[in-house]
Image (cartoon, helix red, strand yellow):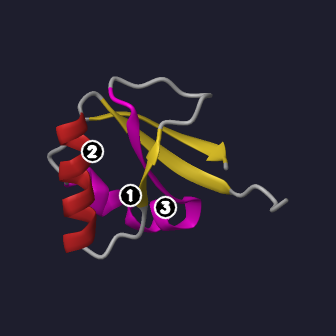
Amino acid sequence: MRAKKPYQVLTFYTTSAVMELEAFCKQNGIPGRLIPVPRELSAGCGIAWRMESDAYRQHSGLLAECPVEIEQTKEVLL
């Protein structure tokens, strides 16, 4: 069994919002990937964006420029 690591998980109200954020991240070289929303979180849609916590801290300013509304951002052990 692998050890869990802290990840920053961003949730969204709609699937189209998370897809738009994915495209924004790819265009701007922000690492991360789509995942099902973890059980410990609830979200408007069932898809979330996961990224390493260090990468989130590094790119948080650029993420703030994305026009997509993020429902919540939380650090989760995954």
Mark seen at residue 22: none
Q: CA distance from mark 3 to mark 1?
A: 5 Å
Specify few, some or many for label 1: CA neighbours under 10 Å numbering under 14, 14-19, or 20 or more: few
Residue farthest along the front direction in this orientation: 1
At label 2, the amino acid type is Val
Specify few, some or many for label 2: CA neighbours under 10 Å numbering under 14, 14-19, or 20 or more: many
Q: Are marks 1 and 2 in contact (CB under 8 Å)?
A: no
Taking the spot 45% from the left edge, 68% from the top edge, the residue there is: 58
Residue wearing tag 3: 57
Q: Where is residue 33 drawn, in percent x and y?
A: 41, 60
Quarter of the figure with residue 24: bottom left
Residue wearing tag 1: 60
Residue wearing tag 2: 18
Q: Which residues are magenta?
A: 45-65
Q: Where is residue 3 drawn, in percent x and y?
A: 81, 60
Q: Where is residue 50 drawn, in percent x and y?
A: 47, 53
Magenta-span inclusion, residue 42: no
